[in-house]
Image (spheres, helix red, strand yellow):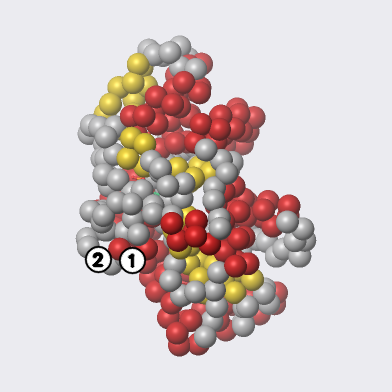
Amino acid sequence: MVGSSIVRCLQSDGYDNLVLRTSSELDLRDQQAVANFFETHKPEYVFLAAAKVGGILANNTYRADFLYENLQIQNNVIHQSYKNDVAKLLFLGSSCIYPKLAPQPLREESLLTGELEPTNEPYAIAKIAGIKMCESYRRQYGCNFISVMPTNLYGPNDNYDLQASHVLPALIRKFHEAKVANQPTVEVWGSGAPRREFLHADDLGNACLYLMKNYDQESFVNVGVGTDLSIKELAEMVKQVVGFEGAIQWNTDKPDGTPRKLMDVSKLHKMGWNHTIDLATGLRITYQDFLTKMNEYL
Ligand code: GFB
């Protein structure tokens, strides 16, 4: 989702010399394959959007895979970027790097000030290691490696597998399928009380290009919209956009996860960047995209 959005942003900005590989063409977990790729192609700028990602259930279930595979991907790409004199690298993290109970909105300075949310601790630790790799290669070797922390994302090419997905695509699919099958209820996980912030992937792609062009500092940058809503409010919004008329059933056997993770985006705003897609608009276009590409997604 994020990689394809960055590609769309680069192409619409006129960049045509893009070196792209799918995961089946180049397995970034394979140290030798990544070394060969960098030596052969010598990329000048690297956007490291590749990662093993998923929603709360996948993070909590495949804890070892999330830790090991993300460390492999980022170790290989960051180290080879140094070895092959990449001019600049942008590493993408996640808002789950912050302590579970950090003051809200989450400021960049809160990193490593408290305990992490247990459901995604392995993923968060891999992402924190990525931030520290970028900082350390900058300090020891003078590499221009920057890190960017997006909030929860959604958009085209999202994952709609109900066991692995994040909440927003899961709700689109659940409400859509319930509407089509005329079901009376839809099950939504947790209590509905947790609050989340949602950024459209195209806004993130745009922010990545902006930071690649304009930001050269060691400290990482939050990317978000600056407002959040409860999962209950999100469920009501998705229900309305999809046109489902039944009831919502809350399954409190499923975890809530972190109570809130709203980003403080003042650093990015001061640099002159703002998102352009509000949640109501983003949800409508994402539901349309889901309807158009359902065969590909499901
Ligand atoms: O999006 P989500 O899976 O991830 O869940 P996190 C957000 C909230 O939505 C949780 C609730 O409180 C879920 O219990 N929820 C309700 C659902 N219904 C559903 C559903 O059908 N599917 C899903 N998936 N959730 C992830 C982290 O945390 O956020 C990752 O695990 C990463 O590490 C990512 O940082 C951005 O926001 O809780």
- Residue 225 percent location from the top left of the image: 46, 46
Q: Nearer the viewer, mark 1 or mark 2?
A: 1
Residue that label 1 marks: 109
Residue bearing the label numbered 2: 113
Q: Residues within 10 Å of mark 2 (few under 14, many from 20)?
A: few
Q: Nearer the viewer, residue 140 or 158?
A: 140
CA distance separating discs 1 and 2 = 8 Å
Image quadrant holding the C terminus, namely: top right
SS at mark 2 in the image: loop
Query: Residue shown at 38%/41% (left/top)?
Result: 228
Residue 274 location (% of width, % of height): 54, 51
Marks 1 & 2, CB-CB < 8 Å contact: yes
Check disc 1 and report its element: helix, strand or loop: helix
The reply to whether residue 253 is in sight is: yes
Task: Tell me the quarter of the picture where residue 80 sits.
Answer: bottom right
Foreground pick, 104 / 270: 270
Q: Residue at x 31, y 59 (%)?
A: 98
Q: Is residue 270 above or below residue 32?
A: above
Q: Is residue 240 left or right of residue 62?
A: right
